Image (cartoon, grey):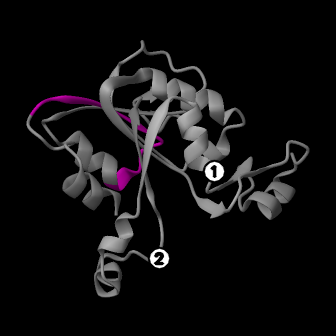
């Protein structure tokens, strides 16, 4: 779905060179992005599976470093997500954009810092290494960090037959497209 979104709805593949930061890169996308001549591509993660090791709450790049940031299903693992969102906003160029995805499973984001046991986290947050479950207020959290957010119901553009053909096994997964104020 994200590959189609980037191809159909963004300027990612336009001829001018863009510096892209891809957090916790998915191999299926990373392979394609790294081969694109219009993308100066950098992957980052806390482990060694990326080009650079990066803590999203303390990004070691100057302000306005990246034209494009793609971060999918990472923030639900980070205790200080507000700081991470602020750092992503800080390193995005003023004319740039970011897609920052998380699973949205509730009306309101749910966090409980007293829950530290992995089994309890799995029970409360759906996965043993998650520290929260995001709700529809996620957009507000991104905006508080300095982003202007468009919530794009991209999957609704596809018929049920197309979703089945492309292997989209979900009915709803809005895209959080972020620019700077």
In the structure shown, which secondary structural element does the residue marked by tag 1 occupy? loop
Figure disc tally: 2
Q: Is residue 97 magenta?
A: no
Q: Which residue is mark 2?
A: 171
| Helix, strand or loop at mark 2 | loop
Q: In x, y percent, where is residue 119?
A: 84, 58
Does the magenta portion include 25? yes
> What segment is highlighted magenta in the picture?
16-28
> For the point 21% across and 30% down, which residue is it?
18
Quadrant of the rendered structure where residue 19 is? top left
Tell me the residue at 58%/58% (across/down).
103
Which one is in front, 1 or 139? 139
Looking at the picture, does residue 29 appear above or below residue 98?
below
Residue highlighted by disc 1: 137
Q: Nearer the viewer, residue 35 or 138?
A: 138
State the image quarter where residue 162 is shown: bottom left
In the rendered image, the quadrant that contains the C terminus is top left
Is 102 positioned to the left or the right of 91 in the image? right
Residue 118 placement (x, y as % from top left): 82, 52
Tell me the mark number nearer the camera, choosing from 2 and 1.
1
Q: In screen coordinates, is 126 left or right of 39?
A: right
């Amino acid at each position: 779905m994200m590959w189609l979104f980037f191809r159909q709805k963004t300027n990612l593949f336009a001829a001018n060179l863009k510096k892209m930061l891809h957090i916790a890169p998915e191999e299926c996308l990373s392979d394609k992005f790294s081969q694109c001549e219009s993308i100066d591509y950098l992957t980052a993660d806390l482990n060694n599976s990326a080009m650079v090791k990066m803590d999203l709450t303390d990004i070691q790049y100057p302000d306005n470093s990246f034209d494009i940031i793609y971060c999918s299903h990472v923030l639900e693992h980070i205790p200080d997500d507000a700081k991470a969102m602020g750092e992503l906003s800080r390193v995005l160029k003023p004319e740039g954009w970011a897609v920052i995805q998380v699973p949205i499973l509730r009306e309101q984001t749910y966090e409980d810092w007293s829950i530290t046991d992995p089994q309890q986290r799995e029970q409360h947050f759906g996965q043993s290494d998650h520290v929260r479950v995001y709700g529809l207020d996620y957009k507000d959290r991104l905006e508080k960090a300095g982003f202007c957010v468009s919530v794009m119901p991209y999957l609704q553009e596809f018929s049920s037959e197309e979703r089945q053909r492309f292997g989209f096994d979900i009915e709803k997964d809005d895209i959080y497209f972020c620019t700077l104020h």
